[in-house]
Amino acid sequence: MKRVAVLGATGSIGASALDVIARHPDRFAVAALSANRNVDALVALCVRHRPALAVIADAALESELRSKLAAANLATRAACGAEGLREAAAGDANIVIAAIVGAAGLDSTLAAARAGKRLLLANKEAVVMAGPLLLQALREGSGELVPIDSEHNAIFQCLPSGRPDLERCRLEQAGVRRIVLTASGGPFRGRARAQLAAVTPDQACAHPNWVMGRKISVDSATLMNKGLEVIEAHWLFGAHADQIDVVVHPQSIVHSLVEYADGSTLAQLGNPDMRTALAHALAWPERIESGVASLDLVRMGALQFEAPDRATFACLDLAYRALAAGGTAPAILNAANEVAVEAFLAGSLPFLAIAEVIDDTLDAMPAEPVGSLEALIYADLTARQHAQRMMRRMHCC
């Protein structure tokens, strides 16, 4: 019986993970659950899954969580804040699902890696910000990382042994020529730049294929989500920037591809449902039922592929730029993007200005070497402050 901690349990990935876990009560039990501020949703999940620990990220809500757990006659213990998240990540769970959105998930992700857990990683920002530190933590803890982003999980499945041993092997030695990440193109695929000037947050969050949170939905609409995945692929699979391509695939059936030196290209296909990747990662190297319907290629008919529109959706190239700069540049990129997306969702920043804020912040902050977590946190904070100042100059905030 494997014990699972789900960090970010009230989000869409958390819901999918708990659905898969509930289908296999003989294999998995829930050890810990966390939420940001939604106490009622967290308590409802505790009633159903009976974890030993529940963590609310907002420390001001810990007493409310404790009283509501008691009112529900649950033995679940309440904890809060960064310390509580670290306890959930490094506690008695065998598997940790890291699904906290944004930079807020970094500390607990590193804690799980250092504790030697099987880390099911959905928090791409943790890799983007702190790729070298995450790999070091995995080595120190002798843990294993299985990505659950659909694209990186697809690559994992298409590589000979999942993730190459980066101490001894590069992709070329595994016969890999390149990695191809697929992008749906988001809700604005095919639109010209001028058509995007007045788009609303609700329009940006109306993803044609996937049910996701609002932040990641906006990232999909700007193609920043794919840019972050390019940086993530660099660290997860030891791929150079020129080995990582992006192709738009609007049906979201081919989740990514790996091209080999002999001309073979392997692809992982499936319906657009996160439960496939989660079931794979939870049971790997075995295969278990996920609850996802079988793929009907005859009904699907045709699959389309096209080049991304980099002129209209500039965030993709900004991510490649940050990857080339290295050091703290990816953390700066991520911080500026989080600030800009938050402002857009609040209605105070135009959609097209998201890329402008990120571009200006990268210009203003030269990359520095990544020496420590503290240095990354400082770069993250400084980038956020710069992005906020820029938006005030733009009269957006």
Image (spheres, rainbow, N blue to C red):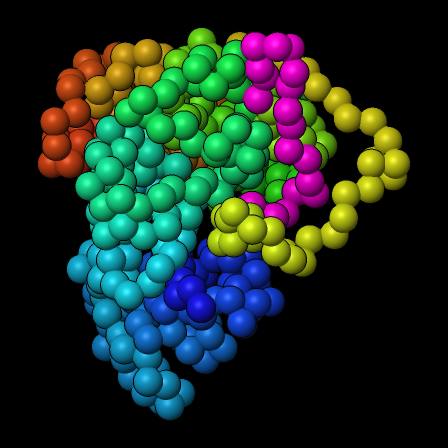
Q: Is residue 178 magenta?
A: no
Quadrant containing the N terminus in the rendered view:
bottom left
What residue is at 60 percent from the left and 67 percent from the top? Answer: 23
Residue 127: x %, y % from top left: 33, 34
Locate residue 389: give its quadrant: top left
Q: Is residue 263 magenta?
A: yes
- Which segment is the magenta one? 258-277
Using residue 374 as the reference point, say whether residue 11 is left or right of it.
Answer: right
Residue 365: x %, y % from top left: 19, 17
Instruction: Name the foreground residue: 272 vs 178.
Output: 178
Using residue 156 as the reference point, say whether residue 322 is left or right of it.
Answer: left
Can you see residue 333? no
Residue 238: x %, y % from top left: 37, 22
Quadrant containing the C terminus in the rendered view:
top left
What residue is at 83 percent from the left and 27 percent from the top? Answer: 302
Q: Number of labelled discs?
A: 0
Give above or below for 218 relative to 275.
above
Give above or below for 143 relative to 302.
below
Residue 36: x %, y % from top left: 34, 59
What residue is at 40 percent from the left and 87 percent from the top? Answer: 72
Instruction: Name the foreground residue: 337 vs 276.
Output: 276
Give above or below for 191 relative to 251.
above
Can you see residue 169? yes
What residue is at 42 percent from the left and 78 percent from the top? Answer: 50
